[in-house]
Image (tube, rainbow, N blue to C red):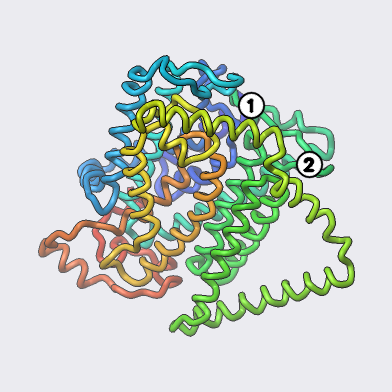
């Protein structure tokens, strides 16, 4: 175990036994350390990353609080919250061990093991166990945030956790860039101890591909886009002044680091983010809230000024843009001619064929490695699993929670919009069905305010009557209450 892993273990355990939001902040920030093995030795081929270790402790802490296990069971079985995800987990984990045996030897797949070149005949493997564990950990994270995430207090700390995660991602990216430029990349070796194929010191068009402390540029670019999108859409929920300014600067720097990653997936994600942000900005310009409309007008004016400056620069000094055009041409437009694209396309083709060879039942989680999240779901869990998973995503990302206060609906809308670029990037490059802890946490926050209609008790009605139902976003987040809009969910921070 390297010294950074030991330090992180100390931080995780200290946060676990402390009161306050520190474990949540650490959960998000630890996602930047995607190459750090947290257990001694090689782990027997199993990689336990900091975010996974932190998520396991976080889920355990939430569930051990008094009354949270019944609340978790209620959320897991509630059709309006996590029931579809629960059904997917049950079916997926059973299928990981049964389908991989049922169809063993009947189709060829690209195994999960990173050292495998080309396809091999399907057979049960350790990947069925490890990938099922990762998926169950993501499910546990969603469930934990669903249990505690219905308060204004938790929503505020969710926004701050993304801010701290963004700062960590930027710092690790700058470390990678500076140490590479100085010829001291070996100094980052203690942070790169996981048994993944590492593509760290790679250049594109003579420019260092920034990977931070992630396995490759595509992984670093994806986390830049995802965290940057979260900060952009959650910006109205930060306190005015220093906090809001810090979130704005961090978001801009994350987008810049995403560009420096020179990942085609991150470029596509940035384009999707720009399109969504533009449509959202136009919608906010007509808001009935005068403060929101005024803020949107300022943003629109700044963007117009920036666009005008770019146009003027291009007219008088077009050669300044040649490196950018060449980079986009090589990384995005000529992507289909690269060896990486050809190899990853062969993975996806093999996964799709396994889906067809299994009679659309799938061959089990952890049996295939692809480069497309949708094909990964279909190839692993079949049509039934895909219906459950996509149904859960549509439920949480498309529909707003009914009967929630306006400020909660606005917060959920911001989280929903922030997830769309990440989902697009995952669709292009994710190799496994698991979408990761950070996205799982966001889905839990979205599921928390949803609840099937039930007749409230007298105590619940009295509490709802005492709780303000329509607080503006900044005030609601800046002054957290135990009951967010009348919801009697427990306060995690009081434990």
Question: Which residue has dot 1 on it?
Answer: 197
Q: Is residue 261 left or right of residue 44?
A: right
Q: Position of residue 283 (x, y in %)?
A: 50, 75
Residue 337, by quadrant, is top right
Distance of mark 1 from mark 2, alpha carbons? 19 Å
Q: Is residue 414 left or right of residue 227?
A: left
Q: Position of residue 221 (x, y in %)?
A: 63, 46
> Does label 1 or label 2 sit earlier along the sequence?
1
One can see residue 56 in this view = no
Residue at 34% in and 36% down: 60
Residue at 65% in and 29% down: 192
Q: Is residue 473 left or right of residue 271?
A: left
- Residue 280, placed above or below residue 45: below
Q: Secondary structure at mark 2?
A: strand
- Within 10 Å of disc 1 (Cα), the crowding (few <14, some 14-19, many 20+) is few
Q: Secondary structure at mark 1?
A: loop
Total labels: the figure holds 2
Q: Position of residue 178 (x, y in %)?
A: 78, 42
Residue at 43% in and 38% down: 55
Q: Position of residue 445 (x, y in %)?
A: 38, 54
Residue at 45% in and 56% down: 157
Can you tell which mark lies on residue 388? none
Can you tell which mark lies on residue 204? 2
Do residues under tags 1 and 2 come within 8 Å of each other at their CB atoms? no
């Amino acid at each position: 175990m390297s010294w950074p892993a030991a330090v992180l273990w100390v931080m995780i355990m200290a946060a676990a036994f402390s009161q306050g939001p520190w474990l949540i902040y650490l959960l998000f920030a630890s996602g930047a350390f995607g190459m750090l093995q947290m257990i001694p030795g090689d782990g027997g081929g199993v990689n336990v990353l900091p975010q996974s270790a932190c998520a396991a402790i976080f889920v355990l802490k939430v569930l051990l609080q008094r009354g949270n296990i019944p609340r978790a069971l209620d959320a897991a079985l509630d059709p309006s919250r996590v029931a579809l995800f629960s059904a997917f987990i049950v079916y997926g984990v059973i299928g990981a061990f049964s389908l991989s045996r049922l169809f063993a030897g009947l189709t060829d797949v690209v195994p999960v093991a990173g050292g495998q070149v080309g396809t091999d005949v399907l057979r049960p493997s350790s990947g069925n166990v490890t990938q099922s564990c990762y998926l169950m950990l993501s499910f546990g994270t969603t469930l934990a945030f669903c249990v505690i995430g219905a308060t204004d207090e938790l929503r505020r700390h969710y926004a701050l956790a993304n801010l701290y995660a963004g700062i960590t991602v930027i710092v690790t990216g700058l470390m990678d860039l500076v140490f590479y430029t100085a010829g001291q990349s070996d100094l980052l070796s203690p942070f790169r101890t996981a048994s993944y194929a590492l593509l760290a010191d790679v250049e594109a068009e003579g420019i260092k591909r920034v990977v931070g402390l992630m396995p490759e540029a595509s992984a670093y670019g994806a986390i830049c886009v995802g965290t940057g999108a979260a900060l952009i859409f959650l910006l109205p929920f930060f306190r005015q002044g220093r906090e809001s300014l810090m979130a704005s600067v961090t978001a801009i720097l994350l987008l810049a680091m995403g560009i420096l990653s020179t990942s085609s997936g991150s470029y596509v994600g940035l384009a999707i983010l720009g399109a969504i942000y533009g449509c959202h900005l136009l919608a906010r310009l007509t808001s009935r809230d005068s403060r929101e409309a005024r803020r949107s007008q300022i943003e629109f004016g700044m963007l117009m000024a920036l666009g005008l400056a770019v146009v003027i620069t291009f007219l008088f000094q077009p050669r300044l843009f040649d490196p950018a055009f060449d980079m986009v041409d090589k990384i995005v437009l000529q992507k289909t001619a690269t060896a990486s694209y050809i190899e990853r396309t062969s993975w996806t083709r093999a996964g799709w064929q396994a889906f067809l060879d299994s009679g659309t039942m799938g061959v089990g989680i952890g049996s295939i490695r692809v480069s497309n999240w949708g094909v990964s779901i279909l190839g692993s869990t079949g049509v039934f699993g895909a219906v459950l998973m996509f149904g859960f995503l549509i439920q949480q990302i498309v529909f707003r929670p009914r009967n929630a206060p306006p400020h909660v609906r606005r917060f959920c809308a911001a989280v929903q919009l922030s997830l769309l670029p990440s989902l697009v990037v995952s669709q292009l490059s994710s190799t496994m069905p698991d979408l990761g802890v950070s996205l799982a946490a966001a889905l839990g926050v979205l599921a928390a305010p949803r609840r099937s209609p039930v007749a409230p008790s007298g105590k619940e009605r009295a509490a709802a009557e005492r709780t303000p139902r329509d607080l503006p976003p900044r005030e609601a987040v800046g002054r957290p209450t135990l009951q967010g809009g009348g919801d009697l969910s427990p306060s995690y921070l009081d434990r």
